[in-house]
Amino acid sequence: ELDALGPQLDGGEVMALLGMGPGPQVGAALEFLAELRIVEGRLPRLELERRLRAWWAETDRAAAGAGSDGEAGQPPTSW
């Protein structure tokens, strides 16, 4: 029964789908998928992949934007 609450994809599938290697981003993606599963239940595979790609695109843009404005008290990289 607990498997019904976990993400529908595993880390290997996430890495293949998003074209990334092992790292903290995979864990973040799995957390996103687990939350999605709890809130919305089991989704069709294509919808799940669409949602994961949309989440990743938004996350990737946010991370790219954070680097240009400086992080953790550091000056912007454009200086």
Image (cartoon, rainbow, N blue to C red):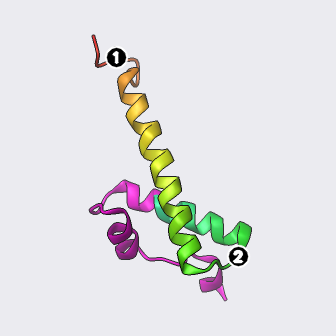
Residue 7 position (above or below residue 72): below
Quarter of the picture holding the N terminus: bottom right
Residue 7 in view (yes/no) = no
In this view of the protein, can residue 59 be seen by the observer? yes
At horizontal 58% and vertical 72% (from top left) the residue drawn is 47
Whether 54 is among the magenta residues is no
Q: Name the mark on residue 41.
A: 2
Residue positioned 49% across, 65% down in the render? 30
The disc labelled 2 sits on which kind of residue?
Gly
Badge 1 or badge 2: first in the primary sequence: 2
Determine which of the numbered discs, if any, sits on residue 10 in the image: none
Residue annotated with mark 1? 76
Percent coordinates x, y for residue 48 in the rendering: 56, 71
- In the drawing, does residue 1 fall left or right of residue 48? right
Magenta residues (range):
1-28
**Does 6 lie within the magenta span?**
yes
Mark 1: which amino acid? Pro
Relative to 29, residue 42 above or below: below
Estimate the x, y position of residue 55 in percent, counting from the top left: 52, 54
* Mark 1, other Cα within 10 Å: few <14 / some 14–19 / many ≥20: few
Determine the image quadrant of residue 77: top left
Q: Is mark 1 on a helix, strand or loop?
A: loop
